[in-house]
């Protein structure tokens, strides 16, 4: 009887380990740049929605728009702290470690909209936000283009999941 229980426990532990190790991490790394490591949130990436032209129009999924949260973990946080201090000297940025921002891609026109960026220390404590809402072109050959291509491919590979979240 003890052998059966031991065998069942072993099999269940093995299966649980296999499932956990196969799970995709929430924050998936895309690149290691000189200044930062760039991640995106796999649990919130989604497509945009069309804007109805009248009350009778249906809101539909717009695969031309991809929304996601990005995280940058800084290699030399003191460098970014100095830049942030120049932008807003009413906040003490000295303990900054990483940032999270909402991003939106216009796939058809190869543009990105970077929204407000929130900054955190190594313990995850909120430090401050820099307000943004700017669209700009993806520069060919840049880290930004590498990230763009990765996100576009991820959206294609996980189309069903993105549709469900949209």
Image (tube, rainbow, N blue to C red):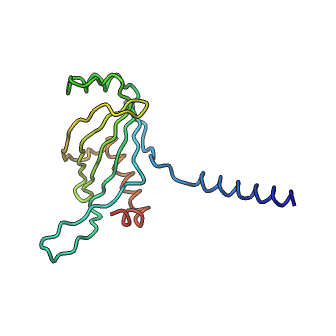
* 136 shown above or below 15: above
User: Where is 134 relative to 65, above or below?
Assistant: above
| Residue 47 position in % (x across, y down) | 31, 61
Q: Residue furthest front?
A: 1
Q: In terms of depth relative to the viewer, which is nearer, 117 or 152?
A: 117
Residue farthest along the left direction in this orientation? 54
Above/below status of 66 relative to 127:
below
Q: Is residue 165 above or below residue 39?
A: below
Q: Position of residue 135 (x, y in %)?
A: 19, 47
Q: Nearer the viewer, residue 37 or 142?
A: 37
Q: Quadrant of residue 166?
A: bottom left
Q: Where is residue 74, by image quadrant?
A: top left
Residue at position x 41%, y 43% in the image: 39
Residue 163, x across and y down, in percent: 36, 66
Quadrant in the picture for the N terminus: bottom right
Query: Where residue 98 sits: x, y (%)?
Result: 37, 33
How many numbered markers are drawn?
0
For this view, does 71 lie left or right of residue 110?
A: right
In this orientation, which residue lies closer to the viewer: 136 or 39?
39
Instruction: Give the residue at x 23% y 51%.
Output: 111
């Amino acid at each position: 009887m003890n052998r059966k229980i031991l065998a069942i426990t072993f099999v269940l532990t093995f299966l649980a380990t296999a499932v956990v190790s196969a799970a995709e991490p929430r924050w998936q790394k895309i690149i290691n740049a000189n200044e930062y490591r760039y991640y995106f949130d796999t649990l919130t990436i989604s497509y945009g929605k069309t804007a109805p032209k009248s009350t009778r129009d249906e809101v539909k999924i717009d695969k031309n728009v991809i929304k996601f949260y990005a995280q940058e973990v800084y290699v030399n946080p003191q460098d970014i702290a100095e830049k942030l201090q120049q932008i807003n000297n009413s906040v003490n940025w000295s303990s900054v470690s990483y940032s999270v921002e909402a991003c939106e891609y216009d796939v058809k026109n190869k543009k990105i909209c970077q929204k407000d960026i929130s900054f955190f220390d190594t313990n995850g404590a909120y430090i401050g936000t820099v307000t943004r809402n700017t669209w700009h072109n993806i520069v060919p050959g840049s880290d930004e283009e590498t990230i763009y291509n990765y996100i576009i491919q991820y959206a294609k590979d996980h189309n069903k999941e993105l549709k469900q979240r949209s």
